[in-house]
Image (cartoon, rainbow, N blue to C red):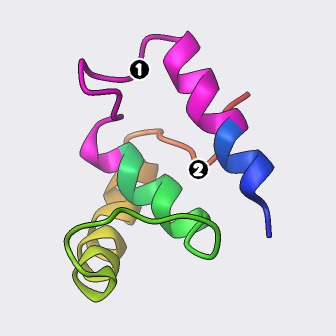
Amino acid sequence: MNIESFFKTYFALARDGKLNKRGLPNLFLIATISLAHQNEIGLANPPWIVQKTIFTILAPISKLLGFKAEYD
């Protein structure tokens, strides 16, 4: 498992002001990070199969926009 990488990324995004008022990154970042760390952590809703389907569609677009799965 690579939970340390997830938290390093999340706190780096917070430090750089890339989270909204609710403490979440934009949907493209969520897609990229969630797929990269799907064995460590996930959102409570919607069900994982729905998340994975949506994130799999959004992840290539996210990468084209320059978003990464890990920040430090």
Question: Considering depth in this image, is 31 or 11 the residue closer to the camera?
Answer: 11
Question: Considering depth in this image, is 65 or 34 the residue closer to the camera?
Answer: 34
Q: Residues within 10 Å of mark 2 (few under 14, many from 20)?
A: many
- Quadrant where the image shows the N terminus: bottom right
Residue ID for mark 2: 69
- Quadrant where the image shows the C terminus: top right
Question: Considering depth in this image, is 17 or 57 the residue closer to the camera?
Answer: 17
Residue ID for mark 1: 18
Q: Amino acid at mark 1?
A: Lys
Residue 46 appears at what percent x and percent y? 19, 72
User: Compared to 57, does 33 lie above or below?
Assistant: above
Q: Estimate the spatial distance between the alpha carbons at disc 2 and disc 1, rounded to whole Å.
A: 14 Å
Q: On the image, which quarter does residue 22 sit in?
A: top left
Which portion, as a residue range, is magenta? 8-28
User: Compared to 2, does 17 lie above or below?
Assistant: above
Looking at the image, which residue is at 28% across and 37% down? 26
Looking at the image, which residue is at 32% across and 56% down? 61
